[in-house]
Amino acid sequence: METEKFQDYAYGELAAAMPHEQGVCFLPECSASFNPTRDWQIHCCPACAQKTKSEMRTWGHKMAMALLVHRMGKYEKDDDAIRERTKVARRFTARIQSEWLQDRLRRTAASITGRQE
């Protein structure tokens, strides 16, 4: 069984509220302006797309176990140890998401500052 990509699953919602600026490379350290050849294009070149894929893989690996553990225990009502494990998995996931966002914002700011100098 192949699971569909988030981009396919949430196509309409992403089209209505894109998580990137159209015509600006989604890779924070690049953030170059470019003319997209497709409506869905978020990178200026294949190298930036590959770097983003690698970034997502790295952060995804950090979150994978916590995401799975959270889902495994989400509906537990009786076992306190499983409920505590589930809570810590949820907190960990939220923390890592925040760290990832802060890292991207920092890299974007550094890229913009570097171009202005």
Image: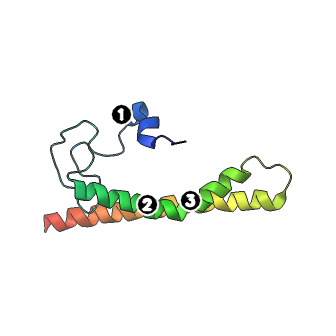
Along the viewing direction, whichever of 57 and 102 lies nearer the viewer: 57
Is the Cβ of the residue at disc 3 closer than 8 Å to that at disc 1?
no
Along the viewing direction, whichever of 85 and 116 lies nearer the viewer: 85
The percent position of residue 64, horizontal first and vertical second, equals 56, 59
Label ID, residue 64: 3
**Helix, strand or loop at mark 3:** helix
How far, Cα to Cα, is label 3 from label 1? 26 Å
Along the viewing direction, whichever of 102 and 57 lies nearer the viewer: 57
Location of residue 41 by image quarter: top left
Please give left or right for residue 6 compared with residue 93 in the image. left
Residue with the mark numbered 1? 15
Q: Quadrant of the N terminus?
A: top right
Label ID, residue 30: none
Q: In the image, what residue type sits under mark 2?
A: Arg
Location of residue 15 by image quarter: top left
**Helix, strand or loop at mark 2:** helix
The percent position of residue 100, horizontal first and vertical second, equals 44, 62
